[in-house]
Amino acid sequence: MVQPNRLLFFFIGMSVLFSCQRVVESDQYGEKFELNSPLSPDECIHALETGKNRKEFTIDDNQTIQGMQAQVKGKITAMCKMSGCWFDLETAEGLTFHVTMKDHQATNPKWINQQVVVNGYAYVEKVSIEQQIAELKENDATEEEISGVNAEKKSYQLYALGVQASK
């Protein structure tokens, strides 16, 4: 006869085994797309600054942006440590090109320092002095860094529909 405690532990163990979510590593996340002459982050920023191909797009929560549809190829320099739902791409000019995944979908956190191609909508966002200070405080910045914020700044963004590892 099977002891009730062993049977209970067996069922608990089986339910834990089958209920745990595994992170599935893939070469592509989000919507699938065909490569179509991706731009570098710097080329995309230049196109945004000159107003080339700007249109109105609607993204999360019915937010309307003025931007351009783009594919951008670059190296990830910073990433969400939890699930990879946002990351920054390296630019030659030392600017930040920030990518947010549609619906905050996860990507592969192991992609830090890797080349990726991102497909989505690029746009420029103005960041107020208050927003900059709040972000600095959230990241434990020094008083000197905080007091150095004295003007609104531009933030280059890409709302990603899909991303894939670059081969």
Image: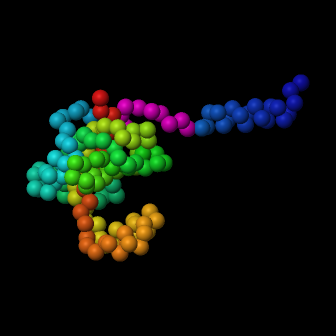
Is residue 35 shown above or below 121?
Answer: above
The answer to whether residue 30 is visible is no
Quadrant (top left/top right/bottom left/bottom right) for the N terminus: top right
Q: Quadrant of residue 29?
A: top left
Q: Main secondary structure of the magenta part?
A: loop
Identity of the residue drawn at 54% across and 35% down: 22
Whether residue 147 sits left or right of residue 152 in the image: it is: right
Tell me, what colour scheme is on the image?
Answer: rainbow
Residue 20 magenta-highlighted: no
- Comparing 156 with 3, the one in front is 156
Residue drawn at the location 25% of the way across and 66% of the way down: 153
Residue 136 vertical placement versus 2 (above, below): below
Q: Is residue 61 visible?
A: yes
Left or right for 166, reference 81: left
Residue 101 placement, left or right of 110: left
**Residue drawn at (79%, 35%) of the image:** 8
Q: Position of residue 104 (x, y in %)?
A: 40, 49
Occupied quadrant, residue 84: top left
Q: Residue 79: image x %, image y %?
A: 40, 48
In the image, residue 102 lies at what x, y percent? 35, 48
Tell me which segment is drawn in magenta.
Answer: 21-32
Q: Residue furthest right?
A: 1
Q: 14 or 70: nearer the eye?
A: 70
Is residue 24 located in the magenta-colored stretch of the structure? yes
Which residue is rendered at x = 61% and y = 37% of the image?
19
Give residue 98's position: percent from left, percent from top.
31, 52
